[in-house]
Amino acid sequence: MQKQKIAVVGAGLSGLVAAINLEQAGFQPQIFEATDRVGGRVKTDYREGYTFDHGFQVLLTQYPATQKYLDYELLDLQHFYPGAVIYNNGRQNKIGDPLRQFSLLWPTLISKVGSVTDKLRVLKLNTELKKKSFDDIFLAEEKTTAQYLKDYGFSEEIIHDFFKPFFTGIFLEHELKTSSRKFEFVYKMFGEGSAAIPKKGIQAIPNQLMAQLKHTKIHFNTPVNSIQDQEITFENGSTETFDYIIIATEASHLISNLKNQQTLWKSVDNYYVSVEQRAFKEPMIALIADEEALVNNIYYLSEPSAEEHVLSVSIVKPHQLSCEELKERISQDLKAYAAIDTIEFKQFYHIEKALPVMASVSYMLPKSETQLKDQIFLAGDYLANGSINAAMLNGESAAQAVISKIKDGSISLSQY
Ligand SMILES: Cc1cc2nc3c(=O)[nH]c(=O)nc-3n(C[C@H](O)[C@H](O)[C@H](O)COP(=O)(O)OP(=O)(O)OC[C@H]3O[C@@H](n4cnc5c(N)ncnc54)[C@H](O)[C@@H]3O)c2cc1C
């Protein structure tokens, strides 16, 4: 075993992957986590037999980092069909990739979403992105996704009816201002793999990472107040010194000279609601494309055969509604746009800091750029792009940088 004392601040995906890498190199790191569990933004509550994820989020099975660190079979992944149900102007349309889900061939062909040219362009974009490497995507010039789609030649109609609601649910902003790099990356991942949620909820992901840790001590309910050189000051006033510290969460509130580099965040509201009937049987995400709707996307948590149908409802557009007003509005939207009658609101999450706002995104942070000071290293998704993949890769990068520093005295400048 290596003797150096290494602290990791934060037990989100990034901190957990950092600890896995450190253990593999023979270290026994300690993780300091402010809350009572691992996972950070990847969280699930188990209540009255329900599995309530904190916000709708999916694992894209093609993510290189999740393929490397997770056992998909053990996660018992529940895959979504490659496509979406779209509600618009009182109609329900199903569109998808008929090459991967044959049952979507006919609905896609006859759907009123987009022109024939649009449908051909969707296929062309799929093919082009399959050939692009991550470097091709992340070194390309950035523009907004809205501009990218326009420049690609998509009609206003398909942008409005499909791309806008679909990517609003992913980017958590409804103007599609997010970088075209992130759009290409996510589109490529959707095109080459599937979107899935573990049977036991999204929390199964960090739980599986934690289970891989055999020599790491995790200190729960131990918020860090500040970090100066090698010393950590905890919120209870105690201090402890380490040889190396990896900060696997936004660092600006912990390091005094980063105070003016605070990250801005995108928020989302997520309601779980039981409903009268199941509007479609397939495991698909449904989008409400009508401009006036506040609800953006929904999906059925329950199996089609279940006696009770529970919907996860995501609201991305900013609003000033109280909790009661929001419930009322969700009921109205579901009835008006999707003909779904609500029965009971079961659980609500407002996630204030869901995804970082980023003017420019990268695939991951190179090892050489994770070092902030001699003994302090940075990890976390917010340093590359807000995704499960980036969180894990940045954790790996920071840990590998620390390992190189200890073993070789320096960090190699290889790009990743
Ligand atoms: C609603 C929602 C939907 C999403 N959808 C997707 C999706 O579909 N696909 C996808 O790939 N990604 C999605 N994401 C993003 C993904 O969840 C994040 O990119 C990822 O979880 C970030 O992990 P992290 O470890 O970098 O940060 P975090 O998860 O934020 O972890 C940071 C950890 O540090 C702890 N911490 C913070 N401050 C302190 C302190 N002072 N002392 C000690 N501990 C501290 C926190 O409690 C937390 O556990 C979504 C996120 C949300 C919230």
Image (cartoon, rainbow, N blue to C red):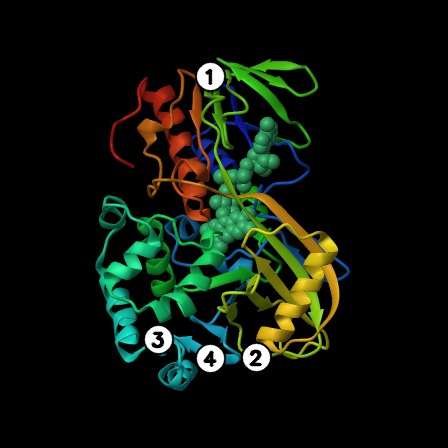
Give the image location of residue 111, x and y in percent.
40, 82
Q: Is residue 159 left or right of residue 333?
A: left
Residue 87 visible, this angle: yes
- CB atoms at circles 3 and 2 under 8 Å apart? no
- The residue that label 2 is drawn on is 280
Question: The residue under label 3 is which amino acid type?
Answer: Gly
Query: What separation in Å lies between label 2 and label 1 (alpha carbons)?
Result: 53 Å
Residue shown at the point (66%, 57%) measured from the top left: 52
Question: The residue under label 4 is which amino acid type?
Answer: Asn
Q: Which is more N-terminal, label 1 or label 4?
A: 4
Most foreground residue, 18 or 121: 121
Give the image location of residue 53, x and y in percent.
62, 55
Mark seen at residue 257 = 1
Query: What separation in Å lies between label 3 and label 4 (alpha carbons)?
Result: 11 Å
Q: Is residue 378 left or right of residue 331?
A: left
Residue 213 visible, this angle: no
Q: Quadrant of residue 122?
A: bottom left
- The residue that label 4 is drawn on is 93
Local packing at callout 1 (Cα closer than 10 Å; few below 14, some 14-19, many 20+) is few
Most foreground residue, 159 or 356: 159
Mark 3 or 1, closer to the camera:
3
Residue at disc 1, secondary structure? helix
- CB atoms at circles 4 and 1 under 8 Å apart? no
Q: Quadrant of the C terminus?
A: top left
Question: The residue under label 2 is which amino acid type?
Answer: Phe
Residue shown at the point (50%, 32%) measured from the top left: 248
Residue at disc 4, secondary structure? strand
